[in-house]
Image (cartoon, rainbow, N blue to C red):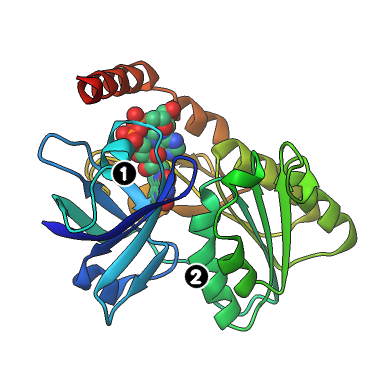
Amino acid sequence: MFKILSNHIIAPEIRKIEIYAPEIAKRAKAGQFVVIRVDERGERIPLTLVDWNPNKGSITLVFQEVGVTTKKLGRVKKGKYILDVIGPLGNPTEVKNYGTIVGVGGGVGNACLLPVMREFKRAGNYTVSMIGARTSELLILEDELSEVSDELYIATDDGSRGYKGFVTDLLKRFLERRRPDLVYAVGPTIMMKVVSSITKPYGVKTIVSLNPIMVDGTGMCGACRVIVGGKLRFACIDGPEFDGHQVNFDALMNRLRMYKEEEELALSLLEKSIKR
Ligand SMILES: Cc1cc2nc3c(=O)[nH]c(=O)nc-3n(C[C@H](O)[C@H](O)[C@H](O)COP(=O)(O)OP(=O)(O)OC[C@H]3O[C@@H](n4cnc5c(N)ncnc54)[C@H](O)[C@@H]3O)c2cc1C
Ligand code: FES
């Protein structure tokens, strides 16, 4: 059992949670994730390690309440326990001095961008972060990202904060003027697809952190299969980061839609049981 040290809302339907998990906190690296299970009847879901403190023995996750498991996790109060936290899983980000790195985040992906940009900055890179959200209310971790970025650009779909439009528009404009050594993108699959298509003609190396459905997170179940460079790969053990120019994003988007009906049914059952 894993104790919840804190659990609060940081934006509508987005929560930051701190969990006592000393063994994971000791070994965590940027780019890795954990698989959690709230209770014995619950599903396993992957969440990115956003921060960790080996002295305190804690790990920090940021998640959007989109379905049954994330909603259940949101309701576990400080001092209570969840059943499983397995990790750190996945390959850490390859952190080295590339030169100039542009990190592109969208939605809750901005939280996943934070540890990666922090490590890139520590390795001596010039870091440029571009973060986007639907509206200013949903923009998360702006101050934290600002601390690890030499330049920070913001886009909101409705123009309530920063540039009015998509974060990918900011990237397009940037590439017209400057040529980074690496682009790193994490967020909605469609955003990572667009980022990769923008950087390809410029020949800028592009890493994306993929978010397929995962079950065990250890290469056993095949749920997280993705096609990269025409080959079948498992995001949990071969990724979650891949060369964006090689990823078959359409296949990934189709797989993400596969359980839509079941997910909607499970959510409506959870909502009914809460109302009772
Ligand atoms: C390596 C990895 C790291 C992740 N890190 C984070 C994170 O730090 N914070 C966070 O909020 N989410 C993260 N995700 C996505 C997260 O795992 C899903 O949102 C979660 O599994 C949804 O579970 P649920 O039961 O609440 O919702 P479900 O009922 O399973 O799904 C509800 C809705 O979310 C969509 N969805 C389901 N699974 C995913 C997925 N893997 N990616 C995108 N959309 C999905 C469904 O299509 C559906 O529309 C990560 C995914 C991966 C693979
Ligand atoms: S989650 Fe089962 S193989 Fe990757």
In the image shown, does 124 or 22 lie closer to the viewer?
Answer: 22
Q: Position of residue 76 (x, y in %)?
A: 23, 47
Task: Please tell me whether residue 211 is drawn above or below residue 114 in the rendered image.
Answer: above
Question: Could you tell me residue 118's position as x and y percent?
Answer: 54, 73
- What whole-number distance in Å separates the C-alpha atoms at marks 2 and 1? 31 Å
In this view of the protein, can residue 225 be seen by the observer?
no
Quadrant containing the C terminus in the rendered view: top left
Which residue is at 71% across, 68% downward? 181
**Which label sits on residue 74?**
1
Amino acid tagged 2: Glu
Q: Who's the residue at 65% across and 46% down the image?
A: 136
Mark 1: few/some/many CA within 10 Å (<14, 14-19, 20+): many
**Element on which disc 1 rests:** helix
- Of 195 and 164, nearer the camera is 164
Q: Residue at x 56, y 45 (%)?
A: 107
Q: Which residue in the rendered view is the most extreme toward the right?
A: 177
Secondary-structure class at tag 2: loop
Q: Residue at x 36, y 51 (%)?
A: 47
- Relative vertical location of residue 29 with respect to residue 107 in this rendering, above or below: below
Q: Pick the residue in front: 27 or 81.
A: 81
User: Given the image, on which type of amino acid does mark 1 rest?
Assistant: Gly
Question: Relative to 273, is 61 above or below?
Answer: below
Relative horizontal placement of residue 182, taking residue 69 as reference (left or right): right
Residue on which the image places disc 2: 94
- Between tags 2 and 1, which lies in front? 1
Q: Which mark is residue 22?
A: none
